[in-house]
Image (cartoon, helix red, strand yellow):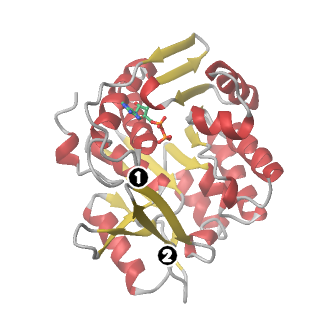
Amino acid sequence: MGGHFLSIGECMVELSQAEDGHLRKGFAGDTFNTAWYARACLPADWSVDYFTALGDDAMSDEMLNFMNAHDIGTSNIRRLRGKTPGLYMINLKDGERSFSYWRDSSAARQLAADGDKLRTAIEASNVLYFSGITLAILTHEDAETLLSELRRAKAIGKLVVFDPNLRPRLWSSFDAMHTMIGEGARASTLVMPSFDDEASHFGDDSISSTIRRYRLHGANMVVVKNGAEGATVGADAGETLVPAAKVAKVVDTTSAGDSFNGAFLAHYLEHDDPVAAARFAAKIAAKVIQEHGALVPREKLQATK
Ligand code: ADP
């Protein structure tokens, strides 16, 4: 049947240390990672597009080329004069990873400043994906623009999917985060939170309370990821725990949640069975955490059925 999947957010330049000490350049960001895995898992009659804003520098060109080379559509991406993409660096010290970010004035902060362009892109899509990070990087006014377009999409029956991806440091205050994450859920059909984030920042004492909270905000379905414990699908039919796949050695958990989301959605869109989709997503996420980096190539995922 096929359709059009649109992911909305910020993709950054990623610098990480190669074994020889040199810096390696890549591209990543939560909503982009999910688009990557949706693309890897969806059949060819689905298009996967990324919606963001980039600058007019060489690095923005390179990022666009990277997306196109991997079959992720870029025709809706705005180019802003004099701007650049955000950047982050992964620091490795004694096996522990930490991150430094340069994203305060990235082009992506203005991704929703052109409301007409946003509306056109959303209207041309069947499935919309965004995250708490997407909302956090926007001005309040632009976040409202995005949310009102998403509410409209939800109201006419499109699938709108939200990963709260709570990052208190990106928000001006806890209250701002709390309010806007609630608004994100209200604009969505499906919410895909990570339990450890929800427990640490919103004080949820159980997965059921996370599911209940987001359903009260207006999401029809909630899929709560919980690391090695698996994921729980919460819908009208009740709650179903889908165990994680067994992993002998975890190499790098970057993108576990993002890949889970992309694989879940790809399966769900084709088969309309959320529990089977969670089983498939657990297998993909298990492969991803046994490889280095956020974006594991399609060939390495393909043996997963
Ligand atoms: P996030 O990256 O958003 O914090 P989680 O850590 O909850 O997300 O992981 C997302 C999914 O990745 C889980 O639901 C599970 O399927 C898989 N996963 C994560 N950690 C492990 C692990 N140690 N063993 C097996 N699967 C895992």
Query: Which numbered tag is attached to residue 85?
Result: 2
Query: Which numbered tag is attached to residue 189?
Result: none
Residue closest to the eye, 84 or 207: 207
**Image point 36% across, 37% down: which residue?**
263
**199 relative to 25, above or below:** above
> Which of the 4 image quadrants contains residue 258?
top left
Image quarter for ligand 1 = top left
Residue 60 at what x, y percent from top left? Answer: 42, 78
Give the position of the N terminus as an image quadrant: top left
N-terminal label among 1 and 2: 1
What residue is pinned by disc 1? 33
**189 relative to 84, above or below:** above
**Image point 37% across, 55% down: which residue?**
95
Residue 266 at what x, y percent from top left? Answer: 37, 36
Mark 2: C-beta under 8 Å from nearest atom of ligand 1: no
Left or right of 188 in this view: 24: left
**Is residue 28 in view?**
yes
Give the position of the C terminus as an image quadrant: top left
Furthest residue in direction top, as rendered: 237
Residue closest to the eye, 88 or 272: 88
> Which of the 4 image quadrants contains residue 182?
top right
Q: CA distance from mark 1 to mark 2?
A: 16 Å
